[in-house]
Amino acid sequence: MQIQFWRLVLLLSWSSWRRTVLLITSAALVACDNGSITLSVTDTPADEVSRVVVQFSAVEFEDSGGDWERVELKPELQVDLLALRGGDSKVLIADESIPSGSYRRIRFVIDADSNGSESYVDRTNGGRIALEPDGGEDARPTVDFRFSLDDGDDVALTVDFDLRRGLIEPDDFSDPYRLRNALRVVDDEFSGRVRGTVSAALLSNACEPALYVFDGEDADVGDIGADNEPLTSVGLVAQNGSSGLSYSIGFLEAGDYTIAFTCDAEGDDPEDDDELSFRRERNFEIEEGEETILDIN
């Protein structure tokens, strides 16, 4: 009887241990059925404004089945997009766990009110004006971008809010600025940047300079709003001790591009097809994780 009793104890102990192992293994499998995503925002700067502040409260990801995965930002995050120039970015969500799978769209929940206390624009000539997404305070800027997230994987994406294309000036001072869907997404792992200078010989007294970037070599160049509009564009900044100007453009996917210089940037209305004169066009290549130096002479 005593031997049978201890056999029973051992059998029960083995059974309990096996159940424990199964529970731990199951929990580990469930925990790994997610991937990790980091999402940042950057900006292609706009003209005639000194700050463009957007208050983000959530980011949503649409999977291939049409369901949305929502990531709340707590607390809400106010970002001055205009400060994110030259390849700088601001992290909205870091290493956030979301279900693994295929995704096809990203959208942003932005807080906006009529008095500009949440999202707003400061003009260089003074005055603060409310900012809201195009379509009203409850609209959500959305961009198509397909990516897959396997179990345990992590991905880092950056969304470019191209303010030169997307920031719409109000017709009346009492109306808000509008932020339309001029968004571009790049996977950080497969991106690089280009930087360089523009010679003073290309600048005239009436020059409002900017550089426009187009997909592919020897691309057909056009203004913002045209059928062949640029992938992105950037203004130029003065160099210390030089009469030329410098530029830096980050988060470009690896590949071939055309860059074009214009002095007519101020007259480029994103809602119209304008006639721009481009003074120089150059081809360049972006490699993953690399910086390309390209001077425009």
Image: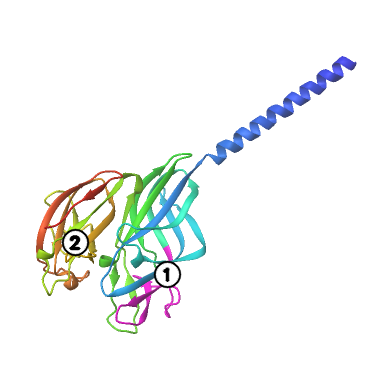
**In the rendered structure, which segment of residues is drawn in magenta?**
109-138
Q: Position of residue 208 (x, y in %)?
A: 17, 71
The correct choice, above or below, for 130 with respect to 43 in the image is below
Which quadrant holds the C terminus? bottom left
Q: Can residue 64 be seen in this view?
A: no
In which image quadrant can residue 19 be found?
Answer: top right
Which residue is tagged 2?
211
Q: What residue type is labelled 2?
A: Leu
N-terminal-most mark, 1 or 2: 1
Q: Which residue lies furthest to the front in this view?
A: 241
Q: Is mark 1 on a helix, strand or loop?
A: loop
Number of marks in the image? Answer: 2
- Distance CA(mark 1)–CA(mark 2): 33 Å
Q: Position of residue 252 (x, y in %)?
A: 27, 51
Q: Does the magenta stretch include residue 105?
A: no
Question: What number is the disc on residue 138?
Answer: 1
Q: Which of 240 and 111 is in front in this view?
A: 240
**In front of the other: label 1 or label 2?**
2
Q: Which amino acid does label 1 sit on?
A: Asp
